[in-house]
């Protein structure tokens, strides 16, 4: 039987006949391939939707604020110190809103960065593993609480508490909003920094311990610098999050634009302003409507800068290990 | 030699001190969480009763309830899930299994990373300009649902990709070696094996969406609404209607925001009640997600 | 004498059918001799080159794999044995930057496996593979074996019958017949590997490729699988890649020795291990390197 196979195949090759039809795709195979290509295209479109959404965001912001900037000179927008777009004689200086955003962000970062870093070092280098397993998800719960609930907490609990410590503190102030926002942001810093520190190979630590170093020195001098790009990217994520926060500041810091660097005063952030205007009547195309897009594009550019920075740093961090 | 001992003692003290500092800092977050829950409970627990859940908001604090808001939340979440889940899972499958390393793939991945960091209110602004006015979808449940779907899309995509990554390459090779096409591998193997991890991510994404306030305010969700959207089920043919999609709405976090912003302290209690409902729902969803993740890890050990 | 030398040359270069068919008479004469000492060829590798990007992993490989025999491919790490094996079912296609040159002709159909026009999915249905690490699906034992059959769209009764047949061929039926619905991961490593063999056998493949199938298993499981391979060769042509020379000596009829992507020697196993033609082969076999 095998000899016959050999002879026949030898003969057919000698006769120069083409290979059998299995090599050529049948109609059924072609249909199956078509189906595969269609499915792949649909999946690609789904993935490409992310690009479409970005285009939608950028396009809308540019389009809607272009009418604004047709009326309002960019120089005024950037340098005027009053933001009163809904007044009879409106002023369009974004500076008070930026000041409000920066001050609340600064307060939040002064809470979140030190505490978050210390927690990260503690969990990564000091805490027993069981404690880490319990604490890490619990802290992550902090970021799961809706921000409107945090706003309530800031207004109803934190503000009265701070009023006892700081006499004369108004009910609405950037301090309580900032502090609560900072606490909310702690897990962003602690979780990511801890991941970065855990990724540092044991071998580096062992080098330090072998020289007689204690834990804190190893943590600060060896682990922290080695994990720096991951840690810094977590800081940048925190900054970006704080800049974009809306409800906590809208509820607890008040919604009146106020150019000041004193956190004990109330002020409006860019985000709070957008909320305030949206709560009222917004005829399409009115100057009030346009002003929120101008504020929005400013906010978008601010966070974009930090997001790009953070992305670049995260890529570098992943490449190292 | 005693120098040596002194240095060692000092180092040990440093470690001891830092241990304390570390524990204190960790407690800051946990104590705050506890204080927040306690605050909410003490302010609002008394207010939680059946009438609260089934009444419309009102000018009178004692009579105001969250009926329209939680119904609105439910409907919005339905639209959000229907939009975000298929889109996000499909995108995740494409990026993980089909995409080649070229500039288009890089562009898509950069976009997803960027979108995850865009403040939620910006999504509201986009939806206002694009969906409400350009596409004329109005200030409706459909708009709200789509806005939140875009917001949580990056989370769903990342969750899907992570879940797919846990499947070992050997399983894919075995399936291909038996003559599966790519889609057959995805459909018969990758999706079923990764469903647990993906589900976890989706539930966490939805729990985030439930608490979102700013984007919905921006698209014009109402803060005072004393009626429910029309029912999707009708008694006359064709028996289902899509009217509800285009109805105005409110959601629970907006209702809470509205009440907490009032100077009248009576409404604070209502706000606390609404906040409690919100927290209970959010924490339960997170708990369900963690439970699913735990069960899946036990079932399939690669 | 001349024919014997020609036979040996054919073996190391891969016999080309064209060269032997000068006249029909010549065909009959030489094929009679061929039939006596050379069984029919199942797969002919001709001038095969393989590239991972710019790196050439296989250089001008020519081997005729005999039908219904076990052929082992041995060589030190990195010599290209697995790379060669994975050409047969086009598994390289799944990864970017891979390139084939040359032919692998599957007999009796004459199809060139690595021709881009050839459908890799179809090749994989006709040629099965068993991997180094058992990769059973997280499904039930039955569903694992049935999967290939479901891909072919077989009816339920056919699936059940063929699955049982495959499990018997893989010497696993008696151990699992009462628990077909249990998870495959409840089986031991050796059992899972036999399950993977059953899974590959279920669709009646023409060839079975084994990629170091026992390197992750204990000696007892290894012995059972080697026994199994010896029984299976009556059904299918088998190519086994192994880094264990003793395994090659135990299990295979013919052996190919690869070194740095080139074929050094290809001959009957007994000859290769007792009296290798090539010095390099001798050094490898006696443990001078690798």
Image: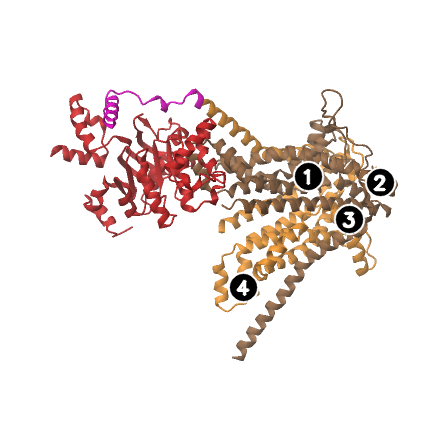
Whole-angstrom CA distance, mark 4 to mark 2, is: 58 Å
- Quadrant location of residue A297? top right
- The lab-note entry on whether marks 3 and 1 share a chain reads no
**Residue position marked by numbered label 4 in the rendering:** A218
Name the secondary structure under disc 2.
loop
Report the disc number at residue B64.
2
Q: Disc 4 vs disc 2: which is toward the camera?
A: 2
Whole-angstrom CA distance, mark 1 to mark 2, is: 31 Å
Please check the rendered image and state whether residue A12 is part of the magenta-colored stretch, yes or no: yes
Earlier-in-chain disc, 1 versus 2: 2
Disc 3 and disc 2 in contact, CB within 8 angstroms: no
Residue stretch rendered in magenta on the structure:
A1-29
Report in which chain the residue with disc 2 lies. B
Q: Please rate how many residues cluster around mark 4, counting C-alpha atoms within 10 Å: few if below 14, some from 14 to 19, many from 20.
A: some
Report in which chain the residue with disc 1 lies. B
Q: Position of residue A253 (x, y in %)?
A: 77, 49
**Vertical position of residue B12 compared to residue A95: above or below:** below
Q: Position of residue A116 (x, y in %)?
A: 64, 56
Q: Which chain is orange?
A: A
**Residue position marked by numbered label 3 in the rendering:** A152
Q: Residue at x 38, y 26 (%)?
A: C117
Earlier-in-chain disc, 4 versus 3: 3
Name the secondary structure under disc 3.
helix
Whole-angstrom CA distance, mark 3 to mark 1, is: 23 Å
Give A85 or C77, whichever is nearer the viewer: C77
Q: Which chain is brown?
A: B
**Residue position marked by numbered label 1 in the rendering:** B122
């Amino acid at each position: 039987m095998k000899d016959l196979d050999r002879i026949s195949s030898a003969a057919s090759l000698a006769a120069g006949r083409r290979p059998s039809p299995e090599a050529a795709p049948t109609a059924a195979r072609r249909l199956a391939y078509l189906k595969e290509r269609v499915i792949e295209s649909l999946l690609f479109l789904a993935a490409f939707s992310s690009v479409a959404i970005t285009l939608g965001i950028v396009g809308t912001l540019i389009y809607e604020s272009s009418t604004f900037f047709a009326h309002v000179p960019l120089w005024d927008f950037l340098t005027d110190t009053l933001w009163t777009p809904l007044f009879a004689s409106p002023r369009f200086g974004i500076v008070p809103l930026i000041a409000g955003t920066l001050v609340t962000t600064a307060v939040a970062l002064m809470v979140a960065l030190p505490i978050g870093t210390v927690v990260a070092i503690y969990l990564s280098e000091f805490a027993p593993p069981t404690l880490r397993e319990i604490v890490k998800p619990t802290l992550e719960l902090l970021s799961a609480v809706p921000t409107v609930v945090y706003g309530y907490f800031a207004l109803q609990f934190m503000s009265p508490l701070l009023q006892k410590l700081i006499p004369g503190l108004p009910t609405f102030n950037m301090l309580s909003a900032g502090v609560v926002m900072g606490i909310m942001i702690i897990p962003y810093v602690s979780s990511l920094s801890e991941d970065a520190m855990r990724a540092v190979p044991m071998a580096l630590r062992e080098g330090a311990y072998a020289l007689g170093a204690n834990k804190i020195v190893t943590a600060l001098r060896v682990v922290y610098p080695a994990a720096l790009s991951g840690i810094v990217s977590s800081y940048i994520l925190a900054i970006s999050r704080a800049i974009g926060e809306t409800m906590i500041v809208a509820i607890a810091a008040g919604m009146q634009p106020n150019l000041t660097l004193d956190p004990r005063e109330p002020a409006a952030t860019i985000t709070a302003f957008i909320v305030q205007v949206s709560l009222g009547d917004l005829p399409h195309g009115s100057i009030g409507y346009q002003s929120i897009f101008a504020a929005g594009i400013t906010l978008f550019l601010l966070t974009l800068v930090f997001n790009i920075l953070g992305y670049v740093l995260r890529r570098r961090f992943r490449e190292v290990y | 030699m005693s120098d040596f001992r002194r240095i060692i003692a000092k180092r040990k003290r440093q470690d001891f001190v830092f241990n304390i500092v570390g524990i204190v800092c960790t407690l800051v977050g946990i104590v705050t969480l506890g204080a927040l829950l306690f605050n909410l409970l003490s302010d609002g627990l008394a207010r939680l009763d059946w009438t609260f859940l089934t009444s419309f908001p009102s000018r009178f604090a004692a009579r105001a309830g969250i009926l329209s808001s939680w119904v609105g939340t439910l409907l919005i979440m339905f639209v959000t899930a229907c939009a975000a889940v298929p889109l996000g899972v499909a995108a995740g499958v494409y990026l993980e299994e089909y995409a080649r390393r070229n500039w288009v793939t890089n562009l898509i991945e950069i976009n997803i990373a960027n979108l995850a960091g865009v403040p939620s209110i910006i999504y509201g602004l986009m939806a206002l300009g694009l969906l409400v006015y350009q596409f004329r979808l109005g200030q409706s449940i459909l708009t709200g649902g789509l806005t939140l779907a875009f917001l949580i899309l990056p989370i769903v995509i990342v969750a899907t990709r992570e879940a797919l990554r846990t499947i070992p390459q050997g399983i894919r090779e075995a399936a291909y070696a038996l003559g599966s096409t790519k889609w057959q591998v995805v459909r018969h193997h990758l999706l079923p094996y990764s469903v647990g991890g993906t589900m976890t991510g989706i539930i966490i994404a939805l729990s985030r969406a439930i608490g979102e306030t700013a984007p919905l305010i921006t698209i014009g969700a109402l803060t005072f609404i004393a009626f429910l959207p029309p029912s999707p089920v009708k008694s006359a043919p064709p028996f289902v209607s899509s009217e509800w999609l285009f109805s105005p709405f409110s959601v629970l976090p907006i209702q809470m925001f509205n009440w907490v912003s009032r100077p009248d302290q009576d409404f604070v209690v209502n706000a606390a009640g609404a906040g409690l409902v919100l927290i209970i729902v959010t924490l339960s969803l997170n708990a369900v997600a963690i439970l699913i993740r735990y069960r899946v890890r036990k079932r399939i050990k690669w | 004498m001349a024919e014997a030398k020609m036979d040996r040359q054919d073996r190391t270069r891969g016999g080309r059918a064209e060269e032997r068919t000068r006249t029909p008479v010549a065909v009959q004469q030489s094929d009679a001799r061929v039939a006596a000492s050379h069984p029919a060829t199942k797969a002919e590798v001709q001038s095969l080159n393989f590239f991972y990007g710019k790196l050439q992993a296989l250089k001008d490989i020519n081997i005729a794999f005999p039908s219904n025999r076990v052929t082992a491919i041995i060589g030190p790490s990195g010599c290209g044995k697995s790379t060669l094996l994975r050409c047969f079912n086009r598994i390289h296609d799944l990864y970017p930057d891979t390139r084939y040159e040359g032919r692998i002709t599957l007999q009796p159909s004459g199809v060139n496996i690595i021709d881009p026009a050839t459908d890799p999915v179809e090749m994989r249905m006709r040629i099965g593979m068993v991997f180094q690490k058992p990769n059973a699906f997280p499904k039930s034992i039955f569903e694992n074996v049935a999967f290939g059959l479901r891909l072919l769209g077989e009816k339920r009764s056919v699936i059940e019958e063929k699955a049982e047949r495959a499990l018997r061929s893989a010497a696993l039926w008696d151990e699992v017949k009462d628990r077909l619905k249990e998870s495959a991961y409840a089986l031991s490593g050796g059992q899972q590997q036999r399950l993977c063999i059953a899974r590959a056998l279920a669709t009646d493949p023409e060839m079975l490729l084994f990629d170091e199938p026992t390197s992750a298993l204990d000696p007892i499981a290894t012995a059972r699988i080697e026994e199994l391979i010896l029984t299976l060769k009556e059904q299918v042509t088998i190519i086994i890649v192994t880094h264990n020379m003793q395994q090659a000596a135990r299990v295979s009829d013919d052996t190919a020795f690869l070194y740095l992507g080139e074929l050094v020697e290809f001959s009957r196993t007994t000859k290769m291990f007792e009296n290798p033609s090539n010095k390099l082969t001798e050094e490898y076999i006696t443990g001078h390197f690798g």
